[in-house]
Image (cartoon, helix red, strand yellow):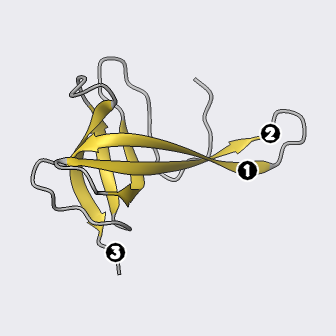
Amino acid sequence: MEKTNEQSVTTYVPGRKKIRLGKVVSNKMNKSIVIAIERQVVHPLYKKYYKQTKKVMAHDEDNICSIGDVVRVMESRPLSAKKRWALIEIVEHAK
């Protein structure tokens, strides 16, 4: 596995679930949030860093997240057609 400079420092351990840090971009659904996970990647030819963003849906059981919160999510079993992540904690509340 190639290491990249990511916002959330993650290490791969076989049999463990992935944990990511991201920002809440939508909380309009009941018990669901959309999170933007941003990471930095090195361009293979030019060796410059650029940002890549991926949006994932996560399960928020108590509807406690608001837009702009920085949250930590963990990989989980499929909870719906698009939801594969679960909220662990809110790292920083939106201002």
User: Residue type at mark 2?
Assistant: His
Q: Is residue 16 above or below residue 56?
A: above
Residue 43, numbered circle = 2
Counting residues from the start of the chain, the first of labels 3 and 2 encountered is 2
Q: Is residue 48 above or below residue 1?
A: below
User: Residue type at mark 1?
Assistant: Tyr
Report x, y in % for residue 91.
29, 63
Question: Is the C-beta separation of discs 1 and 2 under 8 Å?
Answer: yes
Within-10-Å neighbours for mark 2: few <14, some 14–19, many 20+: few
Report x, y in % for residue 67.
34, 66
Q: Quadrant of residue 94?
A: bottom left
Residue furthest bottom in the image = 95
Q: Is residue 85 left or right of residue 46?
A: left
Q: Which residue is mark 3?
A: 94
In the picture, which quadrant includes the C terminus?
A: bottom left
Report x, y in % for residue 48.
82, 48
Report x, y in % for residue 81.
30, 25
Q: Which residue is mark 1?
A: 50
Of residue 28 and residue 8, the one placed in the foreground of this image is: 28
